[in-house]
Image (cartoon, rainbow, N blue to C red):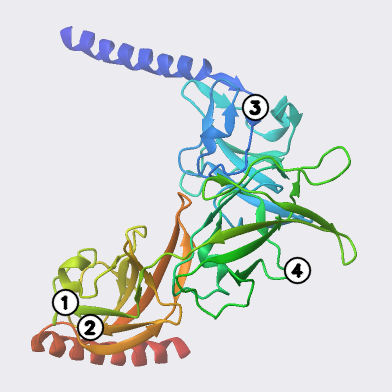
Amino acid sequence: MKKVKRIFAVILSVLLLATAFSLNAFAATLVDTIDLTVDVEPGMMMENYEEYITINTAGVSFAEEAQVFVSEVYEDEYYWPYNNYFEPGCVYEIMIILDVTDGYVFAERESLFESVTVNGEEVYFEAYISETEIEKNLYAVYATVGTEGSISDIELTVAPVAGYMISDYYRYVHIDSLGVVFEETLDNGVIVTDAQGGDPFDYFVEEEYVLEICLTPAWGCEFTKDDAGNIQLGNVTVNGEAVEYTSHIEDNRGYIEYVTLKVNVTPQEKTPITVIELSFEQDLKGYAVEDYEEYITIETPGVSFDVYDPFAVWAYDSDYEEIYTFDGGDHYCLCMSFITEDGYFFDPDGVVVSINGEEYAYVDYYTYETEDGISVECIYTEYETAFVGTTFDSIIAWFRSIFEFIGNILFGWIFQL
C-alpha cells in the first residue's frame, strides 16, 4: 500500500509540475508593439548604442550577441561607415536587434504586430534569424536618422616641429572639431611663409613662421550664417586661444564656403628618429608572442612599442595562420608597431629598421586615430625570423613537410578522379 501511495505521489508531482509549466507559458505577456527613441549626436561612438537608443516598450531588450549595425546612406546606397563615430551632416541606417525578457514573448510574425515605431514614426522591421540561436524569436528594427550639419565652432591644434616637412601640414595642424576639413580645391589647405613673408625651405627650422590655414565644411555640413547669409561662426580657437578669421563664399567655380585663419608659430625642437635598432633573441622557441618585451629589445632611445595598439606585435607561421607561441620547427613573420616618446619624432624622409645589427627594412611613418580621438604616429614593419628551434625541430619539420608533400600528391590524385 505504501508503494502505491509513493507512485501516486510521484505522478501527482509530475502533473503539478506540468501544470505549472503550462500555466507559466500561458501567462507570458504578448509583445505586439515596439517603441524606440533614437537620438544621435555627432561624435557619439556607434558601439555605445545604449547612449542613443532607448527602448520604451516593457519586456523588450537588446539581443545578447547581435545588437546594433550601422550603415551610412549616400544617394540611396549603403556603405560601411568610414569612422566608428557618428559624423555631422550624415544620414545613417541603424539596424537594431531586439529580444524579449523573461515572462514576455514576441508576436510570432510581423503581420501580428500592432505597431513598430521609432521617434513616433512607423518603421520597417522584420524577423531576425540568429546564427547561434536559430529557434529564438528576434526582431530587427530599422531606423534612419540624420545628424546636425550646421558648424559654428572650430578648434585646432597647431604644433610644428623643427625638421617636419612644411608641405606635410596634416602632421602639425590637427582639426579637433567635427565637420571641418582643409579647403584644398582653391589652394593648399595650409600656406606657410617665413616671418618676412618669403617662401621658406622644405623643412621647418627654429624661427617664426606665419601659417594661413584654410578650412571648409565637410560633406553634408555648412557654416552657420547671419540673417544676410554671411558666414558667422561662434568660437574659433587655436591651441585653446581665440583667433580672428576671414570668411569667403566662392561661387564662380561651384559653391565653396571657407574661412581663413592666420597664426604665428615657432616650431618646437625635438630629436629625429632615423634608425630603429632592435635586438632579437637568437631562438624564439617557447616564447609567447604577447611577451614581446622578453625577446625583443629596442636599442634606440625615444622609441617604444605602440601602447595604443593592442596588437603592437603579432605573428603568423609559414601557413599564414596567426600563432600565439613560437613552437619551433618553422619560421615566422612578426608584425611590429612602434611610436616615439616625448621629445622625439620620426624622420619625414623615412626610418631604417635594423635587427641584430643588420639593416632589415626602410619604412615610412603613418598616422592613425584611436577610438579616444588620439592621433598616433606609428612605424609598422614586418620581420621574417630564421628557422626557430633546435636541430631536432628541423628534422621533425623536414619529415612533416615530406609527409605533407606526399599527402598532397595522393589526395590531389584521388580528388582528380
Q: Which residue is mark 3?
A: 34
Q: How far, Cα to Cα, is label 4 from label 1?
A: 52 Å
Nearer the observer: mark 1 or 3; the answer is 1
User: In front here: 79 or 168?
Assistant: 168
Comes first in the chain, label 2 or label 4: 4
- Residue drawn at 21 percent across, 88 percent down: 357
* Residue 253, x across and y down, in percent: 87, 67
Dot 1 amino acid type:
Leu
Q: Is residue 384 left or right of residue 91?
A: left
Dot 3 amino acid type:
Ile
Q: Which mark is residue 185?
A: 4
Q: Residues within 10 Å of mark 4 (few under 14, many from 20)?
A: few
Q: Is residue 18 left or right of residue 62?
A: left
Q: Is residue 373 visible?
A: yes
* Residue 212, x across and y down, in percent: 65, 63
Q: Which residue is mark 2?
A: 330
Q: How far, Cα to Cα, is label 2 from label 4?
A: 52 Å
- Residue drawn at 36 percent across, 77 percent down: 381
- Residue drawn at 61 percent across, 71 percent down: 196
Comes first in the chain, label 4 or label 1: 4
